[in-house]
Amino acid sequence: MKNVSGTKNKIPLLLLVLGLVLASILMSLPLYRFTANVYTKKSANTFVGDDTYLEVRSGVEKIAEDFRAQGMAVTINETVTKRTNSKGEETSLVAFSIEETFTKSIWSFLPVSLPSSVVLRIMAACMILSLLCALAGCAGRKTVLPAAGSPEHGSAVSGNPEHGSAAAGNAGHGSAAAIRFGRRRKKGGAAKKGGRHQILLSASCLLLLTCLVLVPVFILMNNYLFWRKIGLYNADLLTEGKEALFAQIDSFLFHGNMKEAVDQALGNLSVSHSPLVWLLMACFLVSALAAVRLRFGAVKKTLLRAVLIAFVLVVCVVTLYPYYVMFITAFRSNAETLDMYFLHMLPTKWIWSNLSDIVNRGVPRFLLNSLMIAGGATALAMLCGIPAAFAMARMRFKGKKIFLGFVIMSQMFSPVVLLIGISQLMNLLHLSDSIAGLIFINAAFNQAFAIWLLRGTFVAISPEMEQAARIDGCSTAGSLVRVLLPMAAPGIVTTLIFVFINAWNEYTISTVLISTANKRPITVGITQFSSFNMIEWQYLFAASLLATVPVVILFMAIEKHLTSGLTSGGVKG
């Protein structure tokens, strides 16, 4: 037997190792730069060169020498501010500051107990494990070629018909059967081993992708810590865990020399990182692609699939984030809703009484009004829109194109433009400040949209179905009800839900026409939580959370018809 190593695996494996080595080298470079003001001395009514200036300067230099004796590389900065007082006299303020500038590598975060250090430890563990899994997975991936003359090569002894040896022939057949049985056993064992190697290579891919994701997490956590959280602690907006965190930062940055003065040093701390830190993602990406090449063979197809999954995840996060904010704010206290620093991702205490508070302030009545308005407007728009759409799709009459143009043109008018006319018409019909008036108005505004969408649905249905129904004795109305409506169900459901949502979200007309509090829809009713003086965010979001429930239930009930209905009208007619 000859064992031939998979030479095609060597290049991807070398690229994987090279990417990890380059990442380790980058993490050893001084990519983070810190500048801290460790001491400040101000001297008023002091001019450069006078005795007071020289005395203060000498004291500052002595303190700087003490810092240098502790191993800190410090520099002295001097600023002079000159002013003229109310008496016309010139005054001068001299400020001396001792600053320390130093650099840190990413690996230097590893032994400390900062929040980003945990991420770095996970990243380091993933780097080591991914390399071990890749090496172990490639070690067993060998192609076995049978040697010439071996039984597997097909040169087993078999019977020779020319010699008429039947016994030899039977022995040959038995030997061939034994060889085939042995091959099946070897193939089964090789499959099991191959499965284990594939699992190892898959684990290597996942670990390297984890490293790729953890790089921006590590950078963002450091930015949050040094640029924001320290400032929140110094402003006394946060207090919990301050001593332990500042002690860790003192040990990490100043080797524990600052002690009680660490607050002042961190108060003016400036942090920057080199753009080279983002090259870590490129290194891990190269290693991950090499691991994908080892595991799947085809990089392009797998990469496109990964990009698609990442894109879907990003879209989901961006889409669902407003709902997440609405949900958590609905159960926060009033003090937390006014927190502009977003100190907590979740409420420190879940205030479930917010729901009972909005119930006592009439929100269920607003929801019921919106259900009646949206449901009535939808039913009326569908009742008038289905016959109109059927006539536009099947019948021929004069002015058909003009009517279609009018239907489209009616969508150009905003409700605000027609507000005065609508208000006068409702007063004339004695429907102002009534739910029935809003039902008629919402149905009218959505009528053109319903007709246009339903017309496309009916055009997509073959006329032969209607003709067959008429042959069986159905009238025009009978064929519409018994044949066309069941076939047009997806398009009707789609139109229904769009009309319902449009009527549910209507705000402008309701604000003008409705003056009685208990007749307001939910879009107008929740404005009671917003005033000139303050906004009750917890009640506003709790009411908004309840307002989404009916629409979500409607979507869940008819979701299976929605997809086919969206494309049912896509036929030119």
Image (spheres, rainbow, N blue to C red):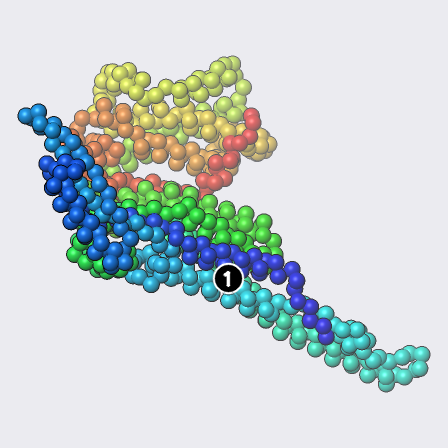
In the rendered image, residue 113, in percent from the top left (x then y), is placed at 29, 61
User: What x and y, as percent, mark residue 540?
Assistant: 22, 39
Q: Is residue 10 above or below residue 475?
A: below
Q: Residues within 10 Å of mark 1 (few under 14, many from 20)?
A: many
Quadrant of the image occupied by residue 535: top left
Residue 456 picture location, percent across and down: 50, 29
Residue type, label 1: Ser
Residue at left offset 49%, top offset 58%: 20
Residue found 86% across the figure and 85% down from its top:
167
Residue 4 lies left or right of residue 88; in this view the side is right
Q: What's the residue at 78%, 77% (across, down)?
A: 150
Task: Answer left or right for 232 relative to 404.
Answer: left
Q: Is residue 195 visible?
A: no
Q: Is residue 338 visible?
A: yes
Instruction: Say what secondary structure mark 1 lies in.
Output: helix
255 above or below 570?
A: below
Question: 62 or 440: nearer the eye?
Answer: 62
* Residue carrying label 1: 204
Quadrant of res 525:
top left
Name the residue nearer the viewer: 544 or 418. 544
Q: Which quarter shows the N terminus?
A: bottom right
Q: In this rendering, is residue 314 above or below 466?
A: below
